[in-house]
Amino acid sequence: MENAQNEVASCAVKVFLVAENRLLRETLVRLFQKRAGISVVGESRYSELAMEQIAASQCGVLLLDSPMTTQHTSLVDEFCERAPQINVVLFGMDEDFDSFLRAVRSGVRGYLLKDASSAEIIATVRGVALGEAICPPRFCAPLFQFVSRELRQRSGRAQLEAGSNYGLTYRQRQLVLLVAKGLTNKEIAASLNLSEFTVKNHIRRILRQVDAQTRYEAVDVIRASGYLPSA
């Protein structure tokens, strides 16, 4: 019987709780003790010693009350960097998207607002232990939009850097994009409000700069550099 109990305890989600308010810590500890599959292996205030205590506890989930000071925030950042294998969950947070993004950048896996219920806290602890990431549903859409915007901007910067590696001017990069789309010199000239003669000169210079024999070979070379999307 004792061996069975030890086996169940070893399989439980190990939680370390950090919160400034003692009453809150005690309340949450009692809450977790009533739930099967969750074991509280330590609890503490925010302090310099907390880092050592958390590491020694071998917890799987670190549950942190809302960081109220720069020192507390630094502790979160430091811990996420030093112990990425531990799932960090913030609770009691304000409904502030910038704060949420900062937490995501730090490596936090769960983000709960001040109005989160006890059931939501327990579900989040179990969810992150299973490899999930938990955040308020109303943050999902702006998070997707932010990631999409960041990726587009990063792609744009990569394209500019790739173009500059070959010494291509802005006009030449425009022209290469149109060549890649299959436009003729006449169509390119009309699109960029240039003469066909100017377009031909640009193309000749581009061929020399990327060491290509044909306009389509130049497109392939530049595409391989990451400047153009894959065909």
Image: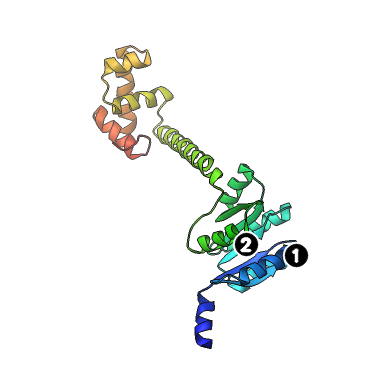
Query: Residue drawn at (55%, 67%), measured in percent from left and top?
Result: 60
Question: How far apart are labels 1 and 2 at the CA level?
Answer: 15 Å
In the image: residue 46, left or right of residue 171: right
Q: Find residue 23 and name its label.
A: 1
Q: Nearer the viewer, residue 220 or 182?
A: 182
At label 2, which amino acid type do we have?
Answer: Leu
Q: Nearer the viewer, residue 120 or 214?
A: 120
Q: Are marks 1 and 2 in contact (CB under 8 Å)?
A: no
- Callout in the foreground (1, 2): 1
* Residue assigned mark 2: 63
Vertical placement of residue 195 versus 210, above or below: above
Figure disc tally: 2
Q: Nearer the viewer, residue 167 or 75?
A: 75
Vertical placement of residue 60 versus 75, above or below: below
Q: Find residue 215 and name its label.
A: none
In the image: residue 11, left or right of residue 206: right
Residue 44: percent from the left, percent from the top?
71, 67
Please tell me how crowded label 2 is: few (under 14), some (14-19), or many (20+) other residues with Cα within 10 Å: many
Please tell me how crowded label 1 is: few (under 14), some (14-19), or many (20+) other residues with Cα within 10 Å: few
Query: Residue drawn at (53%, 87%), measured in percent from left and top?
Result: 2
Residue 227: percent from the left, percent from the top?
38, 35
Query: Residue drawn at (63%, 46%), measured in percent from left and top?
Result: 99
Helix, strand or loop for disc 2: strand
Query: Residue drawn at (34%, 27%), measured in percent from left and top?
Result: 177
Q: Is residue 153 visible?
A: yes
At label 1, which amino acid type do we have?
Answer: Leu
Q: Is residue 51 visible?
A: no
Vertical placement of residue 8 versus 30, above or below: below
